Image (cartoon, rainbow, N blue to C red):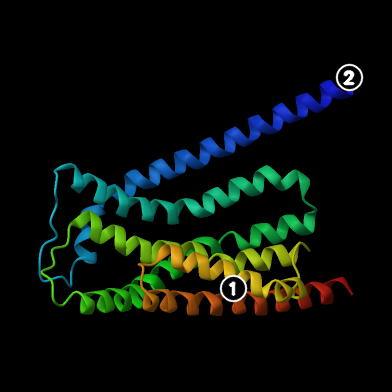
Amino acid sequence: MKAESSESSFVGHLGEMRRRIIFTLVAFAASLCGAFVYVKEIYRWLVRDLDFKLAILAPSDVIWVYLKLAGVVAIAVTLPVAAYQAWLFVKPALQPREQRAALAYIPWLPVLFAGGVVFGYFVIYPMVLQFLEGMSGEFATMYTADRYFSFMLSMTLPFGLLFEMPVTVMFLTRIGLLSPARLAKARKLSYFVLTVTAVMITPPDIMSDILVIIPLFILYEVSVGLSKWVFARSGAALR
């Protein structure tokens, strides 16, 4: 009977997970369709400073470029939906204090994602592009729309995801899974992981790597500082 009860509970959890995933995918699809309606305006804004038209190598390239741009908007819109669905799924296993903590951080997810994308687009991307264009001064250059936006997204989208680090660290500290001491102890390993991540998402040149590594290190130290603040507040609340 106990085995049957465990099996029934496991099947129930799978069914609940399936519903949450489907709801999230539906939200993403709806957001993607909504963003696609305005994707031409998004495209025109992104290429507003270019004094030439981007080339395409095949008619289907237009669709892929528009899908990439609409997809980024859809991800930003879907993030809080996905986080809320995840919260509903794990809610029964959380204490009331943990439930409130998780719910309080969800609204910050799209804000930090947008902030990371903006930082990548206005700070990192222009510096890396200018550096690489300076190196290619002896060559005739022609940008295709697909390659241009693939490069742009590689310089912006990872920052949108990495900027979620502070709120993730704050939440994990709030529920007791992380502490400032653990983060400080893992600093060397974290720096190594962030360095590898920076090398993977940037073009193969040392200057681009440095321009990305430094903000990631700063972001980690900001996360450690926020963890200390949350840890101190949690301790004060318990006393």
Compared across the picture, whether 68 is left or right of 5 comes to left
Compared across the picture, whether 41 is left or right of 70 comes to left
Residues 235 and 141: in front is 141
Image quadrant holding the C terminus, namely bottom right
- Give the residue at mark 2: 1
Residues 25 and 239: in front is 25
Residue 224 at what x, y percent from top left?
66, 76
Quarter occupied by residue 124: bottom left
Tell me the crowding category of disc 1: few under 14, some 14 to 19, or many 20 or more residues within 10 angstroms, Cα based: some
Compared across the picture, whether 112 is left or right of 145 comes to right
Residue 77 at what x, y percent from top left?
44, 54
Quarter occupied by residue 40: bottom left
Q: Judging from the image, what secondary structure is the residue with disc 1 in?
A: helix
Which amino acid does the dot numbered 1 rest on? Tyr
Residue 95 at what x, y percent from top left?
80, 53
The residue drawn where x is 70% and y is 61% is: 101
The residue drawn where x is 57% and y is 66% is: 193
Q: N-terminal of the two: label 2 or label 1?
A: 2
- Give the residue at mark 1: 191
